[in-house]
Every structure is written in structure tokens, then in C-alpha cells.
């Protein structure tokens, strides 16, 4: 017997019944910005992230129905395998959008999963793709915001685990699942979506980079099985052995899941990254570069670099030896010493700063050895404190200069303009495995900007 008043059912009903017309125009526009940004970053990864190649090869080797395109290859594979291959690209450069309040990348698995389904099971109107991205992002962020304990305290790595449910919501919407079928799909996702926090402590691991391959594939698989009639659980989220009981020991705020549901959309709070590194590094990158510019500092005069911030960001500074000399690009992107040293040396941080050659740059590594991080016990490990930080430079001869930044660039409080996002998209496209010509890039930008008028959203992924 099902519970008509369950939280799981309320969320499923919301995803299934929300009309495109009920979504505010600025929220629809934000979904299109997320699609533009996510696709650009994924295309750049086809050329820059060799770690994704095994995922692409594996997807192609499996054969099967030619349903959905693997980005930048021209090859079509079954939808779940295309989501798998393209999902690996989504976070590989750590340059995709982020939801700062929930510490998630909610759209990383959702966009590749949604596009794969649009192409395989269409035609799907562009309006429906927009709605699916909005609703999927909302589900993922609400699940994370409802938590009252950090999941990593219990050994989990939450971003791909939680985002899997948002991706499932989006795919379920596109496949026109009914309320019960979507609950079943959430249940099937619960049985598959997991990720160990051990990836934070293994410097040579590739999993942190390609993690979103798995939730993207899971979302498509779960929704398709539910559509075929596989039954799940009545309460996959709030049940006595549901998501919150399993992963958070029951520590969650149920009201967060439904408060202003359909009135407030968390995608409106998305941030777009100016730097291709962990969001927790951004205020330090910006502050370090600004101090050098404002005070015309010679790098040889820097004796030490002292960073202060939240306890959560200790993961970006420890183990010290690993973070001062990161072995892989993804580890460097999660390193405060390396990213801050790069900002001091180059004035910014770009995709070019994570090549093998850049990782061995002696001038950057020398600066990184002088970077030290201190967790301020007065700062919380959640909320705005996580993304606030200060940089203090001790200079030869004794003077110190210091700068604190409270809100990182690209956030809703300091938003990226459309022109900046288009420039980022063009730059990412130039780095694709097969560089598209300028007219093709212009067509992609135009197609996404007018997505609501397109009858078949699958055309977008077929053209990539």
C-alpha cells in the first residue's frame, strides 16, 4: 500500500505535473545558460581529459542500438551508454556550474543523461528539455540542502550520489513517467548511486574526475526500467531505510524538500565558474591575483602565503605534501597551494594551467611550497562561510598585505554575464577533440539560446 502523503510522492508529483508555462522566464533562461556552459565544458574535456577516453571506448565497444551521440566522435550508442561516456566528460575539467549553497554540481550528470534521452526517445520539444533541467536541478539541490549532517563524516562523497536523483528526475520527466513510475525510478537509483570519500585521499585516483559517468548512466537505466514496470519502494527518500536513513542516519529537515516547491527554483542560485578548479579555491585565486596586481608585488619577495577559511576546505590543503605537488590535473584542481601559486604566478587560472607541463612548473611549485592553510574554528563548515576566504602575503623585509573575499565571482551575488559565458563556451569549443569551425559554434549558441522554439531537442546532441 502506498503512502499518498509521502515526501517521495510529493517530489515525484512535482516533477511529473509542473508545466513548462509555470516556470518563470528567468528560470528557463538559467536552464539554457546551464546547458551552454555544461556542453562547452564537456566538449573541452574531449580534447583535454585523457582520463575520459576509456569511458568513451567502453561505451563504443558495447555496441547495441545507435540511439544517442557520444560527444565529438560522431558515434551513436545506446542511450545509457552515451550518458555514461558523456557523463565522464562533465566534471573532468572541474569547470562546470555549481550550486554553492548545497555544495553540488547538480547539472553535471543531468545534462548528458537528458540529452541522450532526447535523442534516443524523441522527438522531445526544447521546452521539455528546459523544464527537465530546471526540475532535476531543483530535486538534487533540495535533497542536499535538507541534510543536517555532512555525508563525508560517514565516509561518503555526496556530489555524484545526490546529483543522481536530480538526473533521474530529469530523465523521468522526459520519458513521461507517471508519479508511481518516477518513485520506482528513484528507488532504482537508490540501489545504485554511491561514491566513497576515499577518492579525496588517493592522489592518483581518476574517479574524482569521471565520477558523473555513473549517475548519468544510472539515471537513464533507472527511468527505463521503471517505464518497463519494475517496482521500487514506496518511500525511497524518507523511508526507514531510505536515502536519508542510509546516508545521513536520519539527520535531515523534511520541510526543506517541499517548502515553496514550484515557486522557488534552486537553479536560479547556480554559479558559473571563472576558473577550472574546485569552487572552494576561487576566492583564494581571486584574492591572490588581486594582491599581486594592486601592490605590484615581485614574486621573489613573497616569503609566505597564509590562507584562512572554513574547516571544510582543509581537504584542499591536506595532506600538505600531496597538495603542494599534485600528481594529476584533478588533484591540482583540488589543491589550494597549487591554484593559489598559479594565480600569483600568472594572474589567473585557466585550462592551460593543468597540463603535465604546468604541473611540473618549478616556479609554481616553489610558490606552492610557501602556501599554508589555517581553518578558522569560528567559520562554519556549511553555508556562506565555506566559500569565504582570506589571503595574506608576508613579504621580504617584514610587510604583510591581506585581502578577504566573501562572495566568489560567478555566484548569484556576483553573476557572470551572458557575454562572458559565450566567450567561455567558444574557448572550450576550441579545445575539443575535433575543433569545430566558427559557424558551427555560432549555430550551437543560437540553438541553445532559442531552445524553447525547437521541436526536436535531440538535434542538439546529434550535432555535437
Image: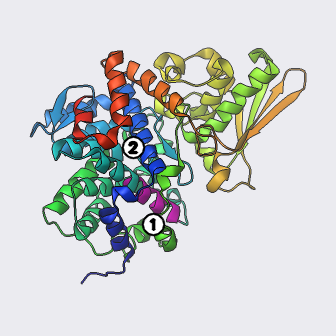
The disc placed on residue 108 is 2
Would you identify the image quadrant in which residue 368 lies? top right
Name the residue rendered at 27%, 26% in the picture: 72
Vertical order, 354 against 39 (above or below): above
Judge left or right: residue 229 versus residue 179.
Answer: left
For the record, the magenta segment spans 136-147
- Counting labels gives 2
Would you say residue 210 sits in the magenta stretch? no
Name the residue rendered at 48%, 34% in the picture: 95
Work out which quarter of the rendered image holds the N terminus and state it.
Answer: bottom left
Vertical order, 150 against 238 (above or below): above
Residue 141 appears at what percent x and percent y?
47, 57
Residue 148 appears at what percent x and percent y?
55, 66
What residue does disc 1 label? 261
Q: Main secondary structure of the magenta part?
A: helix
Judge left or right: residue 383 versus residue 401.
Answer: left
The residue lying furthest to the left in this view is 64
Name the residue rendered at 82%, 28% in the picture: 394
269 vs 234, nearest the viewer: 269
194 vs 35, nearest the viewer: 35
Judge left or right: residue 301 versus residue 55.
Answer: right
Amino acid at each position: 500500500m502506498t503512502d499518498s502523503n509521502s515526501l517521495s510522492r510529493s517530489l515525484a508529483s512535482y516533477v511529473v505535473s509542473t508545466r513548462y508555462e509555470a516556470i518563470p522566464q528567468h528560470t528557463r533562461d538559467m536552464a539554457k545558460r546551464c546547458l551552454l556552459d555544461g556542453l562547452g565544458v564537456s566538449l573541452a574535456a574531449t580534447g583535454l581529459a585523457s582520463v575520459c577516453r576509456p569511458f568513451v571506448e567502453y561505451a563504443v565497444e558495447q555496441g547495441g542500438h545507435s540511439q544517442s551521440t557520444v560527444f565529438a566522435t560522431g558515434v551513436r550508442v545506446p542511450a545509457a551508454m552515451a550518458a555514461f561516456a558523456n557523463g565522464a566528460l562533465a566534471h573532468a575539467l572541474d569547470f562546470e556550474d555549481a550550486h554553492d549553497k548545497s555544495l553540488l554540481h547538480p547539472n553535471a550528470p543531468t545534462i548528458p543523461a537528458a540529452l541522450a534521452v532526447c535523442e534516443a526517445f524523441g522527438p522531445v520539444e526544447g521546452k521539455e528539455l528546459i523544464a527537465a533541467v530546471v526540475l532535476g536541478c531543483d530535486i538534487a539541490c533540495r535533497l542536499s540542502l535538507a541534510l543536517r549532517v555532512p555525508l563525508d563524516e560517514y565516509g561518503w562523497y555526496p556530489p555524484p550520489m545526490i546529483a543522481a536523483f536530480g538526473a533521474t528526475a530529469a530523465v523521468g520527466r522526459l520519458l513521461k513517467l507517471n508519479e508511481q513510475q518516477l518513485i520506482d525510478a528513484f528507488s532504482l537509483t537508490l540501489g545504485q548511486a554511491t561514491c566513497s570519500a576515499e577518492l579525496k585521499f588517493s592522489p592518483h585516483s581518476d574517479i574524482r574526475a569521471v565520477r558523473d559517468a555513473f549517475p548519468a548512466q544510472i539515471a537513464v537505466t533507472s527511468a527505463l526500467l521503471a517505464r518497463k514496470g519494475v517496482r521500487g519502494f514506496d518511500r525511497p527518500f524518507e523511508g526507514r531505510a531510505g536515502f536519508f536513513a542510509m546516508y545521513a542516519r536520519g539527520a535531515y529537515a523534511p520541510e526543506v524538500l517541499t517548502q515553496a516547491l514550484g515557486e522557488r527554483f534552486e537553479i536560479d542560485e547556480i554559479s558559473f565558474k571563472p576558473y577550472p578548479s574546485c569552487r572552494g579555491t576561487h576566492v583564494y585565486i581571486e584574492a591572490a591575483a588581486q594582491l599581486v596586481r594592486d601592490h605590484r608585488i615581485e614574486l621573489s619577495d613573497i616569503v609566505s602565503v597564509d590562507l584562512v577559511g572554513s574547516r571544510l576546505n582543509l581537504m584542499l590543503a591536506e595532506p600538505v605534501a600531496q597538495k603542494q605537488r599534485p600528481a594529476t590535473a584533478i588533484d591540482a584542481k583540488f589543491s589550494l597551494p597549487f591554484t593559489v601559486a598559479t594565480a600569483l604566478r600568472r594572474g589567473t587560472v585557466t585550462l592551460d594551467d593543468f597540463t603535465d607541463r604546468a604541473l611540473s612548473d618549478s616556479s609554481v611549485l616553489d610558490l606552492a611550497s610557501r602556501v599554508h592553510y589555517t581553518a578558522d574554528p569560528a567559520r562554519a563548515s556549511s553555508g556562506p562561510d565555506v566559500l569565504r576566504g582570506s589571503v595574506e602575503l608576508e613579504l621580504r623585509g617584514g610587510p604583510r598585505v591581506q585581502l578577504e573575499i566573501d562572495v566568489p565571482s560567478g555566484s548569484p551575488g556576483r553573476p557572470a554575464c551572458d557575454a562572458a559565458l559565450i566567450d567561455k563556451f567558444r574557448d572550450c569549443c576550441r579545445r575539443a577533440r575535433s575543433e569545430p569551425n566558427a559557424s558551427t559554434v555560432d549555430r550551437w549558441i543560437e540553438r541553445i539560446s532559442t531552445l524553447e522554439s525547437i521541436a526536436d531537442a535531440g538535434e542538439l546532441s546529434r550535432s555535437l
